[in-house]
Image (spheres, coloured by chain):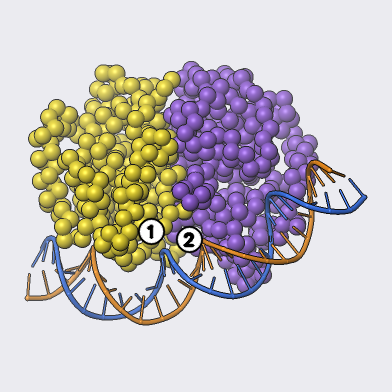
Chain colours: A yellow, B purple, C orange, D blue
Amino acid sequence: MFQQMCQACVSSSHRQPSFRALAAEEQHLAQQEGALMTIAHIAPLAPMVSKLARRATLGVPEMDALLSLPIRQVSIVAGRQFVQEGDTSSSCAVILSGFAGRSKTVRNGNRQIMSIDMRGDIVDLPNSFLGYADHSVTSLSRLEVAEIPRHAILAVAEAYPAIARAFMLDTLINGSIFREWILNVGQRDARERISHLYCEIVLRQREAGLGLGPTYNWPFSQEQIGDATGLTAVHVNRTLQTMRTGKHTLTIEDWAKLQKDGGSEKAYLHQDRMLAA
Amino acid sequence: MFQQMCQACVSSSHRQPSFRALAAEEQHLAQQEGALMTIAHIAPLAPMVSKLARRATLGVPEMDALLSLPIRQVSIVAGRQFVQEGDTSSSCAVILSGFAGRSKTVRNGNRQIMSIDMRGDIVDLPNSFLGYADHSVTSLSRLEVAEIPRHAILAVAEAYPAIARAFMLDTLINGSIFREWILNVGQRDARERISHLYCEIVLRQREAGLGLGPTYNWPFSQEQIGDATGLTAVHVNRTLQTMRTGKHTLTIEDWAKLQKDGGSEKAYLHQDRMLAA
DNA sequence: CGAACTTTTGACAAGCATCAACACGTGTGG
DNA sequence: CCACACGTGTTGATGCTTGTCAAAAGTTCG
């Protein structure tokens, strides 16, 4: 199974699922998974709520408050920068489907992607609380988001301490992921960086209930992978080729190694943790 | 003044203030600054409180609750890893003086420093809330910390919503700094990385009330700078030399550039922001 | 069918790592 | 008090990893 996944990661673009295929797959998934997914079609924020409920214990009133937040649902084409660095944001985007990335740009025009967010992720939580966007947000694929007015997010956190705690833990876990990315671009070579990125995206999709068995979405271009790993698209291409030929099978070793990193599988994702108060 | 600071940054080790000199300087500072610093000698947590009060509005009861947290004051020699990746921490360290760094180690033994903390910083807030240390913490210089029992930190956050909000904002701002570090190691060259690190440390010392006019502490070895910037100590050395000779005066340009980054000076540090609720 | 994007390939240059050695200052124990 | 180990900064030689520039081939979609 690991082999399969790594295969998928490094396979040539020709075998990548197109966006259309992905949409069909999600449809299929929705029919299979039952309850939660069915609710998701009625209550778009259900994936966000279930994610927050994994962070801290939420009662029925808290879940109701979150599910009944006012939203405006919007579609965004791939490659659109829909939050600009420097904005004083008045709304907070929650991802319903697709992938978004936080990014910053340096003098010479180079871009660094600092995180990748997917279904259920609250992409603008920092911006909403700090009142100032210190980074941009870009759609990495076709994207469906629910926009929540900033004041409503702040109000629900103020009214329900349990929700505030869930936000806090979510923010802390995001911080942990950022630290891991610093390690990734700071100390690992190209092959390791790409493998690591791939493992993270797979594990987080699994946590979010995305993907179908050993099949996961991987709609990222080599340029996007480069932006996320601090490499050029050309070098990503060449690295993926050596990974495909199997000359260096480090990917799979990496996976096993990363699984037991810190005694638990990918401890930095904190997927198995709740507030042990 | 900028020139002076950059001078200090790149100056050879022989002209660096020794730890003893630093201690004397801090003493001197304490005598000059009056009120807050005087309190700090009685109430060790005062710098932490004043930092949190810059994040969110705290009333007198909140400040009292924070100042009367139970602490155990300990000294740590430089280079000691006093929190281990994987620990289930039972206490939370607050820095009273000196510098600490969060770090992780990769397979080949290389280390990445992911943040540098100084007086007033709550270095174990993530560990305390998540109950699991996803990273190690190392003393980068001689260090004085106040250890607070984990349950006490959690209790005070639970009892006072304003304190919880201050913790939340502090965590969000730390997240912003992590993102900037991803950009730093991912997209900038050696000279820019070091300059950026230097500017950040100076600005944060200024915010923390450390440093004396245009003079700031810089007790970091070239190896530590390398660990924080994703470079080797040898390359840091060579880069500092070219900066010293003035062949490339990019440092000062950087400073000016970074000052107006995002319309405000070093926006990612969020030094001028409070919860605009 | 053509425009725009993505992947692929090649030649070449540059930045940075590696390894090894030496200089210098500091602290420490015999 | 000196000898010595140790940490830190410095220098040199060398090579690999990655970036840059340019162009061609394949893919998607209007």
The total number of labels drawn is: 2
User: Within 10 angstroms of label 2, few (less than 14), some, or many (20 or more) residues?
Assistant: some
Q: Is residue B93 above or below residue B261?
A: above
Indicate the position of residue A159 as horizontal and vertical percent values.
36, 22
For the point 62% across and 34% down, the residue is B95
Chain to which mark 1 belongs: A
User: Within 10 angstroms of label 1, few (less than 14), some, or many (20 or more) residues?
Assistant: many
Q: Is residue B106 left or right of residue A71?
A: right
Q: Quick one: A247 or B97, which is closer to the camera?
A: A247
> Would you name the residue on which mark 1 appears?
A190
Indicate the position of residue B19 as horizontal and vertical percent values.
74, 45
Q: Is residue A257 above or below residue B277?
A: below
Indicate the position of residue A53 as horizontal and vertical percent values.
30, 26
For the point 38% across and 34% down, the residue is A264
Question: What amino acid is at disc 1?
Answer: Ala
Q: Quick one: D22 or A183, which is closer to the camera?
A: A183
Judged from the image, the secondary structure of the residue bearing numbered disc 2 is loop
Chain to which mark 2 belongs: B
Q: Is residue B35 above or below residue B173?
A: above
Determine the image quadrant of residue A211: top left
> Would you name the residue on which mark 2 appears?
B188
Q: Is residue B55 left or right of residue A140?
A: right
Question: What amino acid is at disc 2?
Answer: Arg
Quarter of the picture containing the C terminus of chain B is: top left
